[in-house]
Amino acid sequence: MIVLMLCFAVLGGVALAVQASVNGKLGTQVGVFAGTFLNFGLGTIVTGLLVLFFEPKYDLTLLDVPKWQLTGAFLGMVYIAVMVLVVAKLGTAVATVAVIFGQLSMSLLIDTFGWFHNPAIAFSLPRLLAVICLGFALYFIYAGNRKR
């Protein structure tokens, strides 16, 4: 089951890279905010249909959860807008690795301190080395882009 979940996560990463590239091109043609709006508008319609027809019933509704849990929607919009803007300037690979570097760095803090009601996972040298290696990867991918 863990291997299957890892495969799903990798597939999600593939989808994000394709999405970033497509949205970056869209943003150069219609503007950053129009591209972001299209992304969320279409996403809202499709997700609304999925909720309507396939979502099982839960004890709580969106109106019942703690309000801080609703900030994810805003943060998703920030991510899309940033990628629409940045991909056109830096390229898909640099933008994606930069996002993953930020995600990994913040994720380690969230894990270490158990923020947002997540279980705490001890900080370790291998986890720190992973961030450092990704930082080197970001540098080398960026440096490779500059030579072209």
Image: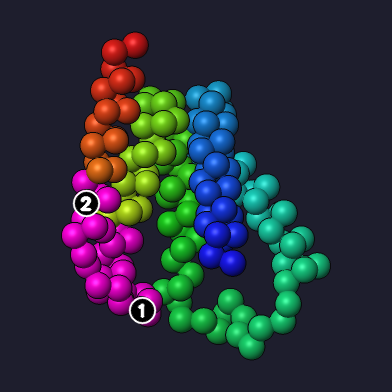
What residue appears at the point 42 percent right and 49 percent down from the top-left corner? 78
- In primary-sequence order, the first of circles 1 and 2 is 1
Dot in front, 1 or 2: 2
Location of residue 23 (image quadrant): top right
**Badge 2, how many Cα within 10 Å: few under 14, some, many 20+?**
few
Q: Mark 1 points at which residue?
A: 119
Residue 129's label in the rendered image is 2
Residue 36 in the figure: left or right of residue 128: right
In the rendered view of the protein, which quadrant contains the N terminus? bottom right
Whether residue 31 is visible here, answered yes or no, is no
Magenta residues span 106-132
Q: Where is residue 56 in the image (x, y as percent from the top left)?
A: 73, 77
Query: Is the residue 38 above or below the residue 3 in the image?
Result: above
What residue appears at the point 46 percent right and 63 percent down from the top-left corner? 72
Q: Where is residue 126 in the image (x, y as percent from the top left)?
A: 24, 57
Q: What residue type is labelled 1?
A: Pro
Q: What residue type is labelled 2?
A: Leu
Query: Is the residue 135 above or below the residue 76 in the image?
Result: above
